[in-house]
Image (spheres, rainbow, N blue to C red):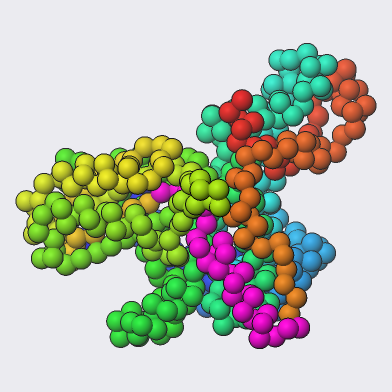
């Protein structure tokens, strides 16, 4: 795939947490152009031993929390991270000083199998906001405070915090992060399913808080990777175990899309600015898919169009996203879908295929999906191993089926076999069944201000610039639109 040697459309810092996350980041670290790493890659784990397995991330970009492992118990690990001052400070300094968000996107990778990555990625999201995005919002809020009457500012704090966040977004000052957290195989057992259910819920909720700067989440499914690896075998996959197979697939789809969208050579190339819009605008699950066929099986534009239609209905890393569902009263509810990308890579052997397949695919897909944004298209003609490949990618405010409801069903099956297991009701199913959190009360955003009304009034009277302690978790998307 010659296009994978192109300059990436989006410059990325890649951060791996725990064993699974650091191994994925290590694959990104292998990519070089002109003898230099293409991606800035870092790794954090709970002990030194696991970091020694990394082959490509430089030692200076590795950090150990010096805890000797966290025993595949993320709830306990979270308590340790909150109570162990040394580990807490190491994580803070790692995020504040070593994760330098000079790139357009910071990618967080972790496994939700119950180890270090499960607990640290949630803490890392909060720390990233605290050290990188919160000061930016504070600056915007102080600037607003200087332009309004003190009484108005105090009486309408919620409105002005929302405006500060909106100003930071419109100026492009907020640093975007993408969160990629793999969910476990069924054989990991009920306790892993329960805890993963809980931590996935935390991540999904964080992704709906605009101030956190989360551009997207992806929940790759290890059960799917295991089933595929087992069906194909070591000879066909080239991997000795499903974990290596999973890590490679996750790396490949991100890197291929990031480079193919910056290729040339045809009249309809994918604009890298359009790719950035798809990846960085809006929120939700980033759904990516890829279908490849032998070039001799693709005879006309109809075949290419159908590849796109098939691709948009599936996903490369997890179960398909259910974009619509029927309610008991006969109504149909749709998930919000933001911009969509359609990209084809055709081997030069079939250079005579008309590009009209893009318009045909675009038309059919637009009629099937309740689109909120724009469909962007492009194609490349170059050496592609005598294959035709199509990529589809979009963000939807919905979850993969197994994560939304499947984990609950699997947990219930374990429960029936072992009645001593108690079912935890606050599952991801609860999130899927709830509203899109667009109506979050901004009052929670002010909970962590750390200032009583009298203190605020005194500071305003003295015309002081004060440090506003708050969490933007209660700013909703509707507040930003108002």
Which quadrant of the figure has residue 234?
bottom left
Q: Please tell me which residue is depicted at 74% across the width and 29% down the height of the picture.
A: 158
Q: In this view, does 85 lie to the left or right of 159?
A: right
Is-magenta flag for residue 457?
A: no
Name above or below for residue 393 compared with residue 236: above
Task: In the displayed orientation, state which residue is furthest to the front.
Answer: 329
Q: Please tell me which residue is depicted at 93% across the width and 26% down the height of the picture.
A: 454
Q: In this view, does 50 lie to the left or right of 335?
A: right
For the question of whether residue 470 can be seen, the reply is no
> Residue 56 location in percent, x, y?
45, 69
> Residue 346 location in percent, x, y?
17, 56
102 or 311, which is in the foreground?
Answer: 311
291 or 472, which is in the foreground?
Answer: 291
> Residue 293 location in percent, x, y?
20, 65
Q: Please tell me which residue is depicted at 38% across the width and 77% down the height of the picture.
A: 228
Q: Is residue 2 left or right of residue 321?
A: left
Task: In the displayed orientation, state which residue is furthest to the right.
Answer: 454
> Residue 458 location in percent, x, y?
91, 23
Quarter of the picture containing the C terminus is top right
Residue range (magenta) = 394-420
Task: In the displayed orientation, state which residue is furthest to the left.
Answer: 352
């Amino acid at each position: 795939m010659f296009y994978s040697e192109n300059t990436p459309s989006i410059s990325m810092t890649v951060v791996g947490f725990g064993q699974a996350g650091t191994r994925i980041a290590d694959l990104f670290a292998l990519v070089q152009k002109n003898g230099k790493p293409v991606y800035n890659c870092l790794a954090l784990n709970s002990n030194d031993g696991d970091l020694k397995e990394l082959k490509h991330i430089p030692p200076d970009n590795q950090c150990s929390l010096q805890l000797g492992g966290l025993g595949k118990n993320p709830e306990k690990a979270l308590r340790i991270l909150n109570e162990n001052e040394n580990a807490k400070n190491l994580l803070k300094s790692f995020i504040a000083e070593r994760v330098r968000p000079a790139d357009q996107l910071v990618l967080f990778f972790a496994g939700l199998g119950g180890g270090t990555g499960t607990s640290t990625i949630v803490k890392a999201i909060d720390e990233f906001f605290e050290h990188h995005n919160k000061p930016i919002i504070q600056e915007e809020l102080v600037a607003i405070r200087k332009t309004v009457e003190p009484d108005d500012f105090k009486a309408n704090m919620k409105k002005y915090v929302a405006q500060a966040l909106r100003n930071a977004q419109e100026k492009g000052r907020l640093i975007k992060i993408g969160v990629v957290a793999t969910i476990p195989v069924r054989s990991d057992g009920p306790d892993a399913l329960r805890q993963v259910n809980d931590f996935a819920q935390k991540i999904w909720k964080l992704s709906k808080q605009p101030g956190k700067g989360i551009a997207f989440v992806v929940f790759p499914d290890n059960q799917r990777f295991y089933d595929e690896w087992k069906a194909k075998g070591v000879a066909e996959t080239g991997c000795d175990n499903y974990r290596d197979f999973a890590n490679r697939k996750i790396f490949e789809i991100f890197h291929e899309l990031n480079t193919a969208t910056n290729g040339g050579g045809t009249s309809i190339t994918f604009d890298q600015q359009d790719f950035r819009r798809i990846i960085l605008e809006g929120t939700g699950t980033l759904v990516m898919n890829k279908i490849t066929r032998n070039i001799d099986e693709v005879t006309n534009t109809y075949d290419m169009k159908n590849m796109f239609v098939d691709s948009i209905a599936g996903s490369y890393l997890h179960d398909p996203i259910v974009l619509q569902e029927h309610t008991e009263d006969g109504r149909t509810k749709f998930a919000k879908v933001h911009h969509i990308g359609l990209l084809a890579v055709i081997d030069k052997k079939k250079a005579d295929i008309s590009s009209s397949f893009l318009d045909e695919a675009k038309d059919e897909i637009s009629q099937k999906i309740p689109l909120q944004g724009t469909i962007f298209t492009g194609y490349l003609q170059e050496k592609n191993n005598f294959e035709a490949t199509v990529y589809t990618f979009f963000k939807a405010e919905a979850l993969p089926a197994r994560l939304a409801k499947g984990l609950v069903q699997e947990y219930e099956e374990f429960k029936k076999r072992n009645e001593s297991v108690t079912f935890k009701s606050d599952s991801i199913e609860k999130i899927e069944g709830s509203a899109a959190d667009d109506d979050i009360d901004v009052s929670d955003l002010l909970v962590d201000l750390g200032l009583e009304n009298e203190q605020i009034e005194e500071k305003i009277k003295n015309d002081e610039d004060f440090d506003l302690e708050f969490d933007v978790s209660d700013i909703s998307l509707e507040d930003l639109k108002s």
